[in-house]
Amino acid sequence: MQQYSVGLIGFGLGGSIFHAPMIAAVPGLRLARIASRSAQAEALGAYPGVRLDDTPHAMLDDPTIALVVVCTPNASHHALAKAALLAGKHVVVDKPFVLSSAEGEELLALARRRGLRLSVYQNRRWDGDFLTLRHALASGELGAVHTFRAHFDRYSPQVKTRWKEEAQPGAGVLWDLGPHLIDQALQLFGMPRSVTAHLSVQRDGAQVADAFELVLDHGATTSFLHAGALVRAPGPRYQVHGTHGSFVKYGIDPQENALKLGMRPGDPGFGSDATQDWASVTAADGVPRTVETLPGDYVAFYRGMYEAIAHGAPVPVRPEDALDVVRVIELALRSGRERRTIDVDLAGTIPASETMY
């Protein structure tokens, strides 16, 4: 098997929890370099053979590095991804892809010109609950879906000192959790005809929006997407209703928590959902039944990246899809600012200065 060396830029929560373990779990990928100013001891302890850098420059100049993963504050995604592509590297960018559709279009064009693979880490496509929902929809037992409700709620009453909660480009919950919910809705039902958004600041001392409600009008289907930081008793993760049946699921995919506890892909029980959180499906007969959650599999993304680089397979997440997510966020920010519904076809491109937070 051909092996490719990977360079990871950033070793905070995203790099250490969501990326490094997944890269290490793919036989054809080798985590060779990590660029991090603040977490070098942690990186060396977790990956003793890795080479550590204070900045990404050495990584980009290293001819043995085939794939660069950008997992840094959102505002730096565009510049770092562009530098990696110009250095001749395949690139994975953590979500959100970039902070404006113009930036995304530039990176897509550059990757095409250079013949390089570019993808975005929309890992929640491989949540067990989402995989289970997709299976239920594919079975046809719900009929034609008219209502999709998805929540990503937390209870975090204290504002933390971190860039995601400061008044800076790419901060706020819409840029943080919004890409997950929007990407899932777009994967199921396509780009909406219109976007309506309500963004709010709910916690004392919050500098940026920490809650949102989005309504995406797909035509026959409407998506209602919600995230909040002051939800003490979360409701269903998903409520999906069709002409023949309904799908209701509580609880969040367990992979993130397992990784934070030190588990790794391949460990017994990794990605397995708690029995009490299994979905309830009520089909045409009106009788609810419990459906076991399919195992979550974040490693699938990097297996897909290996296949894309080694064998020319499609990347696991098309950058065009990630660009559509950014476009919806732009429209949501405009909708919230203007307090009205925005038609997708009539919206045009929003200047980058208006789409930051």
Image (cartoon, rainbow, N blue to C red):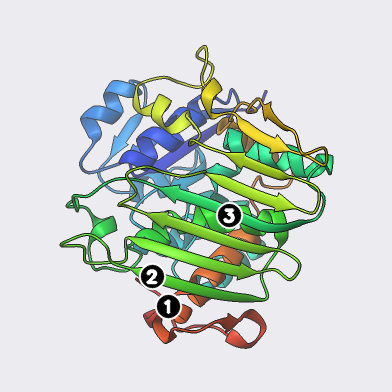
Q: In the rendered image, is residue 293 in sight?
A: yes
Question: Which percent across, then down, holds residue 23?
Answer: 50, 31
Q: Is residue 227 left or right of residue 150?
A: left
Foreground residue among 40 and 355: 355
Q: Earlier in the sequence, mark 1 or mark 2?
A: 2
In the rendered structure, which amino acid carries the disc numbered 2? Leu
Residue lying at 24% horizontally and 34% vertically, measured from the top left? 40
In the rendered structure, which amino acid carries the disc numbered 1? Gly
Residue at the far top in the pictured view? 268
Above/below status of 211 relative to 297: below
Task: Judge depth for marks 3 and 2 and give the one in front.
Answer: 3
The quarter of the rendered structure image containing the C terminus is bottom left
Q: Earlier in the sequence, mark 3 or mark 2?
A: 3
Residue that badge 2 annotates: 199
Q: Are marks 1 and 2 in contact (CB under 8 Å)?
A: yes
SS of the residue under disc 1: helix
Q: Residues within 10 Å of mark 2 (few under 14, many from 20)?
A: many
In the rendered structure, which amino acid carries the disc numbered 3? Arg
Above/below status of 25 relative to 315: above
> How many marks are shown on the rendered structure?
3
Residue lying at 53% horizontally and 54% vertically, measured from the top left? 181
Foreground residue among 67 and 22: 22
Foreground residue among 271 and 244: 244
Residue that badge 3 annotates: 149
Residue that badge 1 annotates: 336
Question: Which percent across, then down, holds residue 305?
Answer: 62, 40
Mark 3 vs mark 1, CA separation in Å:
19 Å
Q: Earlier in the sequence, mark 3 or mark 1?
A: 3
Residue lying at 66% horizontally and 49% vertically, measured from the top left? 240
Mark 3 vs mark 2, CA separation in Å:
17 Å
